[in-house]
Amino acid sequence: MKSVKEMTGSIKKTSRKEKNVTLEQKLNTLRAGVLGSNDGILTVVGVLFSVAVATTNKFTIFIAGLADLLACAFSMASGEYASVSTQKDTEKAVVQQEKKLLKDNYARELQIVAEYYKTQGITYETSLAIARELMENKPLETVTDVKYNLKLGQYVNPWNAAAASLISAILGGVLPLAAMTLSPEVYKWQATIFAVCISVSITGYLSAKLGNGLVKISILRNLAVGILTMIIHYCVGILL
């Protein structure tokens, strides 16, 4: 017959596969990267189309696109840093709250842990035994894990998210910027449109894979947004 400790390990492996915090941190960084890349592509191409319609001077177009690219990249990075920092602060606040609850109402916290294991198909007596053993050794770690799926000391990293967003936004905007400013004059529009379609398709594919979504729909959605962005800014350039 398995010991309580062995049963606990078995349950947590089979019922909480999403617990791998290291993987979650990597996915959070990848998410920031995909969003940053998509934003870099669309904001840069918006400026490029607006300016390129108004002037054929490639240096002017390049400076406008570069300025927008840098502004977009740092804006995305600062936004990610603020957002993920807030998440990290919330996680730390939860830990402090659980420390107080353990001190003020230990019995209630023990009951919550036991109830959790009961929902996994274990008898209440066994669930209570598991909860008691876990709470004896690592009470705070146990309750934060069971209640919030949070491991102590392993919080999301705002710097990683900011760096991923900054770099990906720059990389995302570089391709349409290069296509517009380095292509021969006669092919610059076709080259830029092609570069944008390829770029947004890649980010659509990656976002679908990361979010377990439908790849085809995600790519088509990104293509539609990219094409609409180009049309709108082309029209704005003509009007100006």
Image: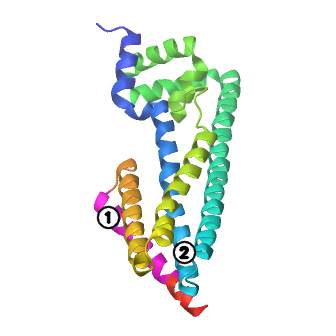
Depth check, mark 2 against mark 1: the one in front is 2
- Name the main secondary structure of what is drawn in magenta: helix
Q: Identify the residue under disc 2.
A: 48
Q: Position of residue 206 (x, y in %)?
A: 38, 52
Secondary structure type for disc 2: helix
> How far apart are the two marked residues, 2 and 1, measured between alpha carbons?
27 Å
| Whole-percent x, y for residue 148 in the image | 54, 35
Q: Is residue 219 magenta?
A: yes
Q: Amino acid at mark 2?
A: Leu
Tag 1 secondary structure: helix
Q: Is residue 46 above or below residue 127?
A: below
* The residue stretch that appears in magenta: 214-233
Q: Position of residue 17 (x, y in %)?
A: 38, 32
Q: Is residue 181 above or below residue 25?
A: below
The front one of 55 and 198 is 55
Judging depth in this view, the residue of 206 and 23 nearest the camera is 206
Mark 1, Cα crowd under 10 Å, few <14 / some 14-19 / many 20+, is few
Q: Is residue 161 above or below residue 147?
A: below
Question: Quick check: marks 2 and 1 in contact, CB under 8 Å?
Answer: no
- Asked if residue 121 can be seen in this view, the reply is no
Q: Is residue 176 left or right of residue 54?
A: left
Q: Which residue is mark 1?
A: 217
Image coords of residue 57 (percent x, y): 58, 80
Q: Is residue 47 left or right of residue 231?
A: right
Quick check: can you spot residue 84?
yes
Q: Amino acid at mark 1?
A: Ile
Residue closest to the eye, 195 or 7 = 195
